[in-house]
Image: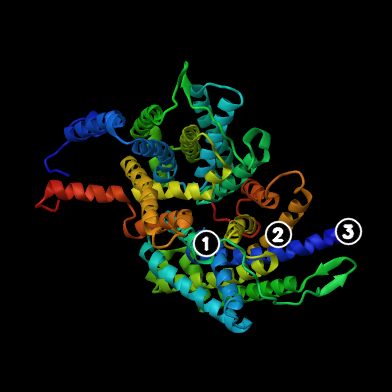
């Protein structure tokens, strides 16, 4: 029984990180309708920068975090200016392919600059578990993850519902050309969306690395965001959170219970099989808007 | 486009070559390719074989992505399905190659339909996500059966094709096989878009609501397109397996799908000639990179270790570059050059 509770807690913690990544994905989708296939690489880049600052240059935590955020914002702005602004108004397929190309470039760049070996995290939190009951442990890092996720959810929901820029981004996602004729600066809004996504994914990557070690394979986890957003709904913030936690728990349980029967990464495959199942059963996801026309 | 040039009947409207000149040039090219092994280097023959195989795969992807508008990220996995099917059939069961080849295509097609069924019912980009899932799931399944597929170690000693005792054991003989097959698939693809089915693919891409109004069944059209594309991928995978004699699962990962996407994006989506351009270009790029790395290895010895990553970086960069600056690909540049040449000093 304790074992199951422990698994659930681990699953929630992993799920919160997935939720952070999914939030980044949903932001981009809500703002521009673009499916960003390069999420994992953004995440890895942010995490690598942050960890390098912390360990190699011994920058203290808060300045390192701010520097990483600044870097993420610059990344977002550059991507928007160089790749997305020329493609405003073009078919959505082109933009998606651009994100794919960007993903490939980033992945290769990370390997060439940082190498393939795992990077060491400096000790951030004490090893003493925060909460200990019988044999159930909640590590400090899990707590940080959950708090960070909660903060992000609240601020983003507020942003999209109440602030001017948030509403403007939703308008642009709905109809780009109409929004432009209303006088909204689509380029600037995209830049904002990509910067927010870069920050979120960098945070997610950093936390993921803190939990399970940082090496380039982590970019592969970026693909894990797809089952989450399909389950939760491609444009729903709430769905990203709920979907993330469910997928996190699903993956933890399946890799523990099924890992003995199959070689390879069972947890991952289970989530993708779940994706196919959800596509068949409830393609809009739990909370997505039911705009998808069935053929 | 020359002025005063009219088409007088439906036959000439649907013709592949509008003027006589391209026919003669194409014949010359075919003759050149057929006699090339007599005087060319062995390595170039090998490269041409690789190009033919890539062409078949790229044609498949262009049919589904360029002509029907559905992004497929699972092409690498479908090549893998074809490669493993053909290898297992010929190596473990001893099926002759000319049976195993179509079986590989059909197996890949079947798997494609399996993943297409849930996602093609929906409009939008769900096929892209489903094929991503396919990529992961298929490779996982391949790794599950080490007895059959060699698991992570892959398969070795895949037999070369043999026709009634005549074994295609040299590069040259295999080259002719691939050349003939590539030519056949090229002709098939080009003719596909002169038929009703092919035009329905294009209709689905351009304006699916209008297509539906005109009576095109969106779901079955999309499924057919995806099935044909996967068939091509299976054939290409099988040819690849028998050329390199040994295969491992890593070859068929997402990077291969991105490679094929870059072939068609750079060459020109929705254009058969563009596929040819893209194939030639993208086969040459790794070679040029390799030569550059060799040249630079005097300066920086780590270069050759970085080569696969440099390749990936270049593919990604080329995708982004071509999409931003010339989204219709090399074939548009080719047409612009041809028009300039023909029409000078006029602009149109």
Q: Which mark is first along the chain, 3 or 2?
A: 3
Residue B139 or residue B204, whichever sits in front: B139
Residue B292 or residue B323, whichever sits in front: B292
Q: Which mark is first along the chain, 2 or 1?
A: 1
Label 2 to label 3: alpha-carbon separation:
19 Å
Residue A201: x %, y % from top left:
58, 68
Same chain for the residues at labels 2 and 3, yes or no? Answer: yes
Same chain for the residues at labels 1 and 3, yes or no? Answer: yes
> Along the horizontal axis of the image, is B319 left or right of B338?
right
Residue B165: x %, y % from top left:
47, 16
> Can you say whether A291 is above or below A171 in the image?
above
Q: Mark 3 points at which residue?
A: A1
Q: Name the residue under label 1.
A: A111
Residue A170 or residue B194, whichever sits in front: B194
What's the mark number on residue A248? 2
> Can you say whether B86 is above or below A190 in the image?
above
Return the chain for callout 1.
A
Residue A268: x %, y % from top left:
66, 52
Q: Which residue is pictured at 76% across the width and 54% down the height?
A: A253
- Judging from the image, what secondary structure is the residue with disc 1 in? helix
- Judging from the image, what secondary structure is the residue with disc 3 in? loop
Return the chain for callout 3.
A
> Along the horizontal axis of the image, is A281 left or right of B321?
right
Q: Would residue A295 be seen by someone viewing this image from the given angle? A: no
Q: Which residue is pictured at 46% across the width and 67% down the height?
A: A172
Q: Which mark is first along the chain, 3 or 1?
A: 3
Residue A95: x %, y % from top left:
43, 59
């Amino acid at each position: 029984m304790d074992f199951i509770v422990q698994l659930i807690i681990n699953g929630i913690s992993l799920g919160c990180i997935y939720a952070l990544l999914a939030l980044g994905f949903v932001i981009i989708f809500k703002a521009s309708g673009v499916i960003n296939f390069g999420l994992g690489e953004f995440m890895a880049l942010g995490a690598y920068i942050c960890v390098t600052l912390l360990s190699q240059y011994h920058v203290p935590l808060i300045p390192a975090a701010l520097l990483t955020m600044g870097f993420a914002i610059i990344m977002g702005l550059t991507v928007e200016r160089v790749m997305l602004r020329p493609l405003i108004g073009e078919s959505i397929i082109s933009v998606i392919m651009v994100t794919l190309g960007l993903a490939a470039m980033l992945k290769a760049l990370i390997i060439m600059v940082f190498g393939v070996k795992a990077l060491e995290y400096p000790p951030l939190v004490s090893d003493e578990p925060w909460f200990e009951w019988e044999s159930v442990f909640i590590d400090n890092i899990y707590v940080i993850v959950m708090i960070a996720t909660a903060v992000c959810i609240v601020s983003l929901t507020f942003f999209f519902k109440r602030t001017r820029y948030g509403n403007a981004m939703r308008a642009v996602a709905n109809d780009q050309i109409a929004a432009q004729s209303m006088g909204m600066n689509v380029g600037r809004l995209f830049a904002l969306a990509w910067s927010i996504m870069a920050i979120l994914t960098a945070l997610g990557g950093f936390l993921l690395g803190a939990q399970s070690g940082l090496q380039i394979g982590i970019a592969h986890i970026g693909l894990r965001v797809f089952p989450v957003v399909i389950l939760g709904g491609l444009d729903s913030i709430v769905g990203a959170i709920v979907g993330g936690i469910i997928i996190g728990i699903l993956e933890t349980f399946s890799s523990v219970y099924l890992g003995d029967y199959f070689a390879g990464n069972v947890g991952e495959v289970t989530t993708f099989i779940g994706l196919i199942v959800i596509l068949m059963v409830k393609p809009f996801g739990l909370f997505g808007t039911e705009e998808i026309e069935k053929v | 486009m020359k002025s005063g040039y009219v088409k007088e009947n439906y036959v000439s409207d649907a013709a592949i070559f509008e003027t006589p000149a391209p026919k003669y040039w194409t014949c010359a090219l075919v003759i050149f390719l057929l006699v090339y092994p007599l005087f060319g280097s062995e390595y170039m023959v090998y490269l041409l074989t690789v190009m033919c195989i890539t062409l078949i795969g790229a044609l498949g992807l262009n049919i589904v992505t360029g002509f029907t508008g559905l992004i497929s990220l699972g092409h690498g996995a479908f090549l893998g399905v074809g490669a493993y099917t053909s290898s297992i059939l010929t190596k473990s069961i001893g099926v002759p190659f000319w049976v195993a080849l179509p079986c590989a295509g059909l197996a890949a097609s079947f798997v494609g339909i399996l993943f297409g069924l849930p996602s093609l019912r929906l409009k939008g980009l769900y096929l892209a996500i489903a094929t991503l899932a396919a990529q992961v799931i298929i490779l996982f399944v391949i790794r599950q059966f080490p007895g059959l597929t060699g698991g992570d170690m892959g398969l070795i000693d895949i037999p070369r094709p043999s026709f009634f005792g005549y074994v295609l054991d040299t590069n040259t003989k295999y080259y002719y096989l691939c050349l003939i097959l590539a030519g056949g698939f090229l002709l098939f693809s080009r003719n596909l878009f002169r038929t009703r089915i092919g035009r329905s693919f294009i209709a689905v891409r351009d304006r699916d609501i209008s297509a539906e109004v005109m009576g095109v069944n969106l779901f079955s059209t999309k499924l057919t397109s995806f099935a044909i594309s996967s068939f091509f991928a299976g054939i290409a995978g099988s040819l690849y397996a028998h050329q390199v004699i040994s295969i491992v699962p890593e070859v068929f990962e997402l990077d291969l799908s991105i490679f094929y996407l870059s072939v068609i994006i750079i060459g020109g989506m929705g254009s058969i000639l563009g596929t040819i351009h893209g194939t030639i270009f993208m086969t040459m790029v790794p070679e040029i990179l390799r030569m550059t790395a060799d040249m630079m290895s005097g300066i920086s010895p780590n270069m050759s270790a970085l080569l696969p990553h440099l390749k990936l970086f270049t593919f990604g960069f080329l995708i982004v570059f071509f999409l931003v600056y010339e989204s219709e690909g090399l074939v548009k540049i080719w047409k612009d050059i041809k028009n300039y040449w023909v029409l000078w000093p006029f602009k149109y």
